[in-house]
Amino acid sequence: MGIGTVVAANGTWPREEIWKPLVEKADMLIALDGAGDRIQADLVLGDMDSILQIPNDKFLHLVEQDDTDLAKALKRFDVSHIFGVDGGRLDHQIGTFFALIESGSNAIVHFDKWCGVRIPKEGRTIKLNQGSIVSLFAFEKVEEIQSSGLAYGFDNQNLEPGTRGIHNEAISDEVFVKCGNGELVMLWSIDSELEQK
């Protein structure tokens, strides 16, 4: 059994040691538009605005322009991992987290030196390196945040959009976060150079 559905976006990909294991362990690999030119996928999804060679037998052409290709994928598939959203257009990078929120996705987004995930109401346990930088971002007022494994823990506290949740630290190899109402995103470092600063 693999790791579920993996989405390869058409931005800058992280280091090969990050994306290659995701591709190798994927039960299904979806390439977003132009990423279909870069990798052999089970399905290429998009509006055909950046792909050079359209694979007729495995292309899902979605013409609506109200969503990014990533948002379209997250609304149609149960995605577990995403990579290739780094670099390129800043609006698409920021939009990645809004796409997670809009779709209610629990996918982990893999950057070159960071990962990110939406925190569902029931909570989420993340395995990471002790000493990793951990930041929580409220996309609206988030109530009743609880955590374990963080240097500066939350015990039924609220968090407003702002900088208060930035630069916490993992004091364990597992961090658990849950919340009541509101949309919360967690980012954590995966690079030892960052973790030591």
Image (cartoon, grey):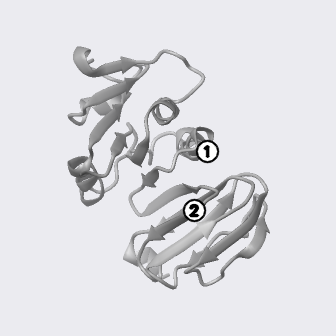
| Quarter where residue 157 is shown | bottom right
Question: Residue at (55%, 81%) from the top-left corner?
Answer: 149
Q: Which residue is mark 2?
A: 186
Q: CA distance from mark 2 to mark 1?
A: 12 Å
Identify whether 3 is placed above or below 35: below
**Residue 34, position as x, y percentages in the image:** 34, 29
Q: Is residue 33 above or below residue 135?
A: above
In terms of sequence position, does the residue under pointer 2 or pointer 1 come before the other?
A: 1
**Residue located 73% across and 70% down the image:** 164
Residue drawn at x 57%, y 62% as measured from the top left: 186
Left or right of 89, for residue 167: right
Who is closer to the viewer here, 107 or 93?
Answer: 107
- SS under mark 1: helix
| Residue 61 x/y as whole percent | 39, 17
Residue 56 screen position, x and y as percent: 25, 14
Asked if labels 1 and 2 touch by Cβ distance under 8 angstroms, the answer is: no
Q: Residue at x 60, y 55 (%)?
A: 120
Identified by mark 1, the residue type is Ile
Position of residue 55 in the picture relative to residue 157 (left or right): left
- Mark number for residue 147? none
Q: Give residue 101's mark.
A: 1
**Amino acid at pointer 2:** Met
- How crowded is the residue under tag 2: few (<14 C-alpha within 10 Å), some, or many (20+)? many
- Mark 1 Cα shell of 10 Å, populated few (<14), some (14-19), many (≥20): many
Residue 55 in picture, x, y percent from top left: 24, 19
